[in-house]
Amino acid sequence: MAAPTLKIDGARFIITVDPERRIIRDGSILIEGQRLVRVDKAAALQHVTADRVIDARDMVVTPGFCNNHMHISYAHATRGIF
């Protein structure tokens, strides 16, 4: 069985964390399962279909970025999780 696919389509900006630190205007992202498989201009992915599509036209997307920042004052909200 193939992994489900997700396409984040037409983002105003995609700020990559790749070695080139590219910023892609009007970009799309294709995800298969848990893997980012392609990050490119929306025009390059316009014919790619996916199980789910998110319209990101007014969004800035940062694929691969994980925000692990947390203030100690949030500890009461996460008690028992960590």
Image (cartoon, rainbow, N blue to C red):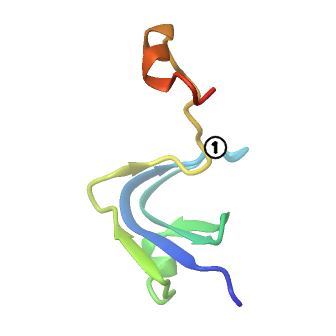
Q: Quadrant of the N terminus?
A: bottom right
Which image quadrant is residue 76 in? top left
Residue at 45%, 64% (x, y): give it: 27
Which image quadrant is residue 73 in? top left
Asked if residue 32 is positioned above or below residue 66 in the image, the reply reads below
Image position of 72 (left or right of 31): left
Image position of 36 (left or right of 63): right
Which image quadrant is residue 33 in? bottom right
Residue at 56%, 78% (x, y): give it: 5
Instruction: Between residue 67 and residue 16, name the one nearer to us.
Output: 67
Query: How far across and down, in percent of the image, does residue 2 sit?
Result: 69, 87
Which amino acid does the dot numbered 1 rest on?
A: Val
How many callouts does the rendering have?
A: 1
Residue at 44%, 83% (x, y): give it: 46
Asked if residue 61 is positioned above or below residue 71 in the image, the reply reads below
Q: Quadrant of the C terminus?
A: top right
Asked if residue 29 is positioned above or below residue 51 in the image, the reply reads above
Instruction: Between residue 62 and residue 74, name the one nearer to us.
Output: 74
Question: Farthest residue toward the left?
Answer: 58
Asked if residue 81 is positioned above or below residue 41 in the image, the reply reads above
Which element carries disc 1, helix, strand or loop? Answer: loop
Query: How far across and down, in percent of the image, does residue 14 sit?
Result: 47, 52
Question: Farthest residue toward the front?
Answer: 80
For label 1, the residue is 17
Residue at 52%, 22% (x, y): give it: 79
